[in-house]
Image (tube, grey):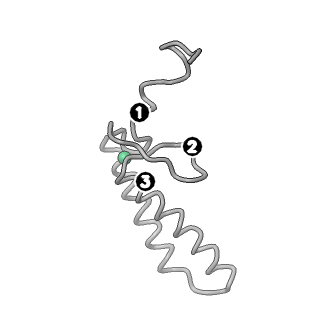
Amino acid sequence: MASGPKGSEDPSSLQCCVCGHQAQLFELPGITAKYCLECSADVATSILLTTEIDAATLAGQDACGLIAECSQLSTRLLERAQSA
Ligand SMILES: [Zn+2]
């Protein structure tokens, strides 16, 4: 409780770091950024997809479908970030 009102806690950190929405924020394991419910779901899915793509590639499988899904998701996240 030593930090004053002008400490490291910036009010902007209460916004979703993707869409800038001020809402209840969620942290994903291993990621310091905070996201609103909608974005955290998409980010979590994209992390999952990336992992699956890596696994499929390593196993010599066709990851085209996963890659397409992943890029669609990234586009959606980008669009949301730009419309903020
Ligand atoms: Zn968001």
Q: Please name the residue that numbered disc 3 is placed on.
A: 40
Could you tell whether 37 is left or right of 53 in the image? left
Dot placed on the residue nearer the N-terminal end, 3 or 1: 1
For mark 2, does the 10 Å Cα neighbourhood hold few (<14), some (14 to 19), or many (20 or more) residues?
few
Image coordinates of residue 3 in percent, x first then y, are 56, 16
Q: Nearer the viewer, residue 61 or 38?
A: 38
Residue that sits furthest to the left in the current view: 83
Image coordinates of residue 15 in percent, x first then y, are 39, 36
Dot placed on the residue nearer the N-terminal end, 1 or 2: 1
Residue type, numbered disc 2 = Thr
Residue type, numbered disc 1 = Leu
Badge 3 element: helix
- Real-space Cα distance between discs 3 and 1? 14 Å
Badge 1 element: helix
For mark 1, does the 10 Å Cα neighbourhood hold few (<14), some (14 to 19), or many (20 or more) residues?
some
Could you tell whether 3 is left or right of 78 in the image? right
Quadrant where the C terminus sits is top left
| C-beta proximity under 8 Å, tags 3 and 1 | no
Image coordinates of residue 2 in percent, x first then y, are 59, 15
Dot placed on the residue nearer the N-terminal end, 2 or 3: 2
Residue type, numbered disc 3 = Ser
Question: Residue at 36% across / 44% down in the picture?
Answer: 19
Q: Is mark 1 within 8 Å of ligand 1?
A: no
Question: Residue at 49% across / 76% down in the picture?
Answer: 66
**For residue 41, above or below residue 16:** below
Image coordinates of residue 43 in percent, x first then y, are 46, 57
* Mark carried by residue 14: 1
Q: Is mark 3 within 8 Å of ligand 1?
A: yes
Q: Please name the residue that numbered disc 2 is placed on.
A: 32
Quadrant where the N terminus sits is top right
| C-beta proximity under 8 Å, tags 1 and 2 | no
